[in-house]
Amino acid sequence: MQKSSRTVAVAGLLALAAVSASAVAASAQAAPAVSYSPADVGFMQGMIAHHAQALEMTALVPARTARADLRLLAERIRVSQESEIKTMEQWLLARGEQLPCLEPGHQHGGMEHMLMPGMATPEQMARMAAATGAEFDRLFLESMIRHHQGALAMVAALFATPGAGQEPQVFGFASDVDADQRAEIARMEVLLGALPHP
């Protein structure tokens, strides 16, 4: 009798679990998937171009600085931003959206190159490329801090746009960019503060 009661109880629990699973599945099917917005597309396209300039900046470091800590910072930035560019390109391609053209003189994701927050001007890039030693170190850190602050402004603008940043993948990616850029800004400010005053 006791065994029979236990069997009935187990069967009841299994039936309840099956009903619950069916209810969850039905609810998931009934709930509309959160779609991406035009602002999400513009953010991804613009951030690819933004990251691309950061890679140009990090490429200047090995031949122009004697500081091992600056070389390591630049390498970390390069690796993280290359990875993020691949993620953004995959996101755009998976949705049939256009990749930005990174050639000089073209628009990036509907935004003119020089209007994107924090990006260095051609003159600033040329000055950095012509510098070496402590002068380069200061120019690089100041420029990259501004560049990262520009990325934070782009994330803030995305989240401030109605209907934007709601798709889970976009929300997670933009949140990660925000956290990573803030951490790198903090590291760069420490390095900048330790440089000798010009």
Image (cartoon, rainbow, N blue to C red):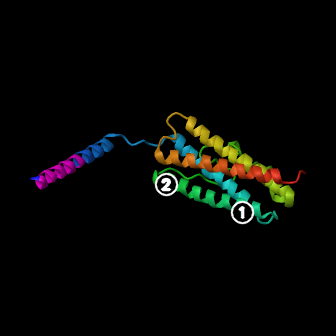
Task: Decide if residue 49 is on the left or right side of residue 162.
Answer: right
Which element carries disc 2, helix, strand or loop? helix
Q: Tell me the kind of residue under disc 1.
A: Leu
Task: Say which of 134 and 24 sits in front.
Answer: 24
Q: Is residue 83 above or below residue 157?
A: below
Residue farthest along the right direction in this orientation: 198
Q: Which mark is residue 193?
A: none
Q: Residue at x 66, y 50 (%)?
A: 183
Above or below — where is 116 with respect to 66?
above
Query: At numbered mark 1, what does the secondary structure look like: helix, strand or loop?
Result: helix
The answer to whether residue 132 of the structure is visible from this angle is: no
Which of the 4 image quarters holds residue 79? bottom right
Q: CA distance from mark 1 to mark 2?
A: 32 Å
> Residue 172 at what x, y percent from top left?
52, 47
> Label 1: how many residues lie within 10 Å, few (<14), some (14-19) or many (20+)?
few
Q: Position of residue 154 (x, y in %)?
A: 62, 42
Q: Which residue is mark 2?
A: 93
Q: Residue at x 58, y 55 (%)?
A: 84
Magenta stretch in the rendered image: 2-17
Q: Main secondary structure of the magenta part?
A: helix
- Residue 96 position in % (x across, y down): 47, 51
Amino acid at circle 2: Leu
Looking at the image, residue 57 sits to the left or right of residue 130; the answer is left
Q: Residue at x 73, y 57 (%)?
A: 57
181 or 63: which is nearer to us?
181
Say which residue appears at 17% left-offset and 51% top-offset: 11
Q: Which mark is residue 72?
A: 1
Q: Is residue 14 magenta?
A: yes
**Is residue 34 visible from the viewing direction of this image?**
yes
Q: Position of residue 100 (x, y in %)?
A: 59, 51
Question: Quick check: is 23 in the magenta stretch?
Answer: no
Vertical relation: 11 (above or below) 71: above
